[in-house]
Image: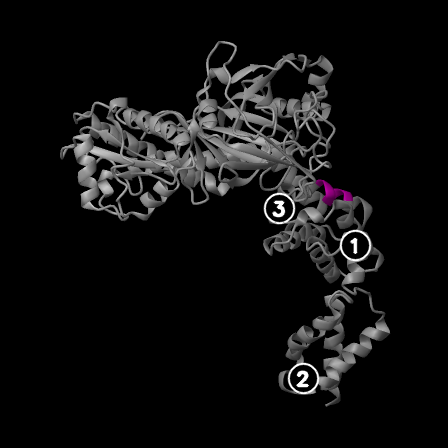
Amino acid sequence: MGLKVGLEIHQQLDTNKKLFCNCTPIESDEYTKKFQRNFRAVKSELGEYDPASLFEKSKSKTIMYYVNPQSSCLVEQDEEPPHNLDKDAKEIALVIACSLKSNIFSEIYPMRKTVIDGSNTTGFQRTMLISQGGYIDVDGEKIGVQSICLEEDSAKLLGDKGSIREYSLDRLGIPLVEIALDPVEAKPSKIKKIALSLGKLLRSTKKVTRGIGSIRQDVNVSVKNGGAVVEIKGVQQLGQLEKIVEFEAKRQHGMVKIAEKLQNSNFDGISRDHIFEITDDWKNCQSKIIQKAIRDNSLIKAIKIPNFAGMFEYSPYDGIRLGKEIGQLVKFYGIGGVFHSDELPNYGIEESDLSIVRNILSINEKDAFLIIAAPSSKIDFAIESIRIRINHAIKGVPAETRLATSNGETVFLRPRPGASRMYPETDIPLILVTKNEFETAENNVPKPWDESLAELQRKYGLNVQLAEQIFDSKYIDLFEKIIEKTKVNPTFIASVLCSSITNLERSGLNSYLLKNEEISKSFEYLESGKITKESIEIIFENIMAGKSRTVEESMKNTSIETLDDFKLEKIIEKIINDNKEIIQKQKERAVGPLMGIAMKDLRGKASGEMINNLLLKKIRKILENE
């Protein structure tokens, strides 16, 4: 296929404030204010419209923004000019550039990147080219770096409700770096390895945010002989990357095969003369979809496609069809789909309805047609996109931006942006990189990933798996701070941070409610004997469920107390006396079921090891007396 793939990594930086204001980068589901905007496309300084902007404008979406004052201000609302660039974000970006041997510019010019899908309240994203060139070493091979940019993250999409698109401003303005790598000819498995290597390098700086959503991979994919560069957005998980590249390669190669078949036919494209309105002609059509469209005062139009019969259903690979591509295209205008001649009669559309269309369009057996029903405000935009897409089918793969789906496929998102998308930022002066800043960045280049892991193992006595888990987690800095404050076993601390909290998250609990100071406090209480090891997970579960805010409050709500030896022994003796039959039958093996009984009452009040030892001691004593 001649597969070629280029990666773009977007990594949030771990700073205390946003890129151009003093707001704290936190996420919340509580919003105290909302406002709405409508965006329109405008010409660039060269007098041209960006194609991606025109496409977004054609959707006619109203954007609703939800605001939490703790994480956003008038800057995010575009009611106040941006403040000075965050120094921490600049320093981290320079360290990352030095780590990749990239050539840093002494002057950085902020730019505006036009974005009118609503993800930026301003209608543009602020971005700065920090450096160009450099490489990352992957198994001894140098993968080139094209560019490194420092930019602000976009708003968080909450969802679409008809013509309303909703965003929250929590994430808008968080600093991130965009690293674009040179395209490589490689198997999808190697692309995954390259992304993994770059992710490890970024995490080695200990200055990047961890967790889902903090790092996103955009993938540029093309195949030879009719392929085009297709940008795939929204790949958030590394395990998804390989599958998506495989699917997109297959999809593009399928489009090339469709083009080859069209090139051997008499297909000559669709003109605007091939479009007919059939709303009145189909008013007696019994299809529920068509009847609903008529009741909603939508228009119904038919498009004649000469010498195209059978091409909508032609499938060079399983699931790869031009009809499916057209269906995905119109959905982004808020239109449910289209009917094409290769699948009709169906969906309540009968042969008599098709005869009407064939007569109006003068269709013969070699021709195909499409039927589309949509509001008058959308239908012409959608039809023009369909016409352009089908006319391009004879050439191969159109250059476009697609969205990664959860099942490892890609769907149409918008056309690829052009050069008209970028223009200078007028609210921020140029930013200088001093010699001292450059030298500081060079001196702070982190150790390689393997060396950092080896140091963790050696310093804290962790095994390889646990060392990798804690280094790869968002708790690495907290882990080291807890060890400095307490003498709790590092392996136990790492296990709680990497396994216990993760398991609670998988149960649907919210780890954002569990603050670092409360985690640290719980280990201090463990060391002082105020709580047991088993209590920690109970406390965390209570806080992550939103039932408590602090360790003390959680201890009170869950009735956690540490029993003295006298009380503990009395409880164990009662359990022994109530279950002598089990002891007589199972002997020392009775410690297992009795441990289960004891933990129901004593979990969090005494350590499991102490309970186990006391039970075993009592059981042995009974057996000796017998």
Identify which residue is drawn at 76% across, 74% down. 614
Return the mark for residue 551.
1
Looking at the rendered structure, the kind of residue marked 2 is: Ile
Indicate which label's residue lies in the foreground, 1 or 2.
1
| Residue sitting at the far bottom | 626
Q: Position of residue 270 (x, y in %)?
A: 25, 24
Q: Is residue 567 left or right of residue 469?
A: right
What residue is pinned by disc 3?
469
Res 138 seen here = yes
> Magenta part of the protein: which range?
477-481
Q: CA distance from mark 1 to mark 2?
A: 38 Å
Say whether disc 3 or disc 2 marks the residue closer to the N-terminus. 3
Identify which residue is drawn at 69% across, 29% down. 18
- 587 over 46 or under it: above or below: below
Q: Position of residue 484 (x, y in %)?
A: 80, 44
Q: CA distance from mark 3 to mark 2?
A: 41 Å
Q: CA distance from mark 1 to mark 3?
A: 25 Å
- Given residues 609 and 157, the one toward you in this image is 157
Looking at the rendered structure, the kind of residue marked 1 is: Val
* 480 within the magenta span: yes
- Local packing at callout 2 (Cα closer than 10 Å; few below 14, some 14-19, many 20+) is many
Return the mark for residue 583.
2
Q: Position of residue 266 (x, y in %)?
A: 16, 25
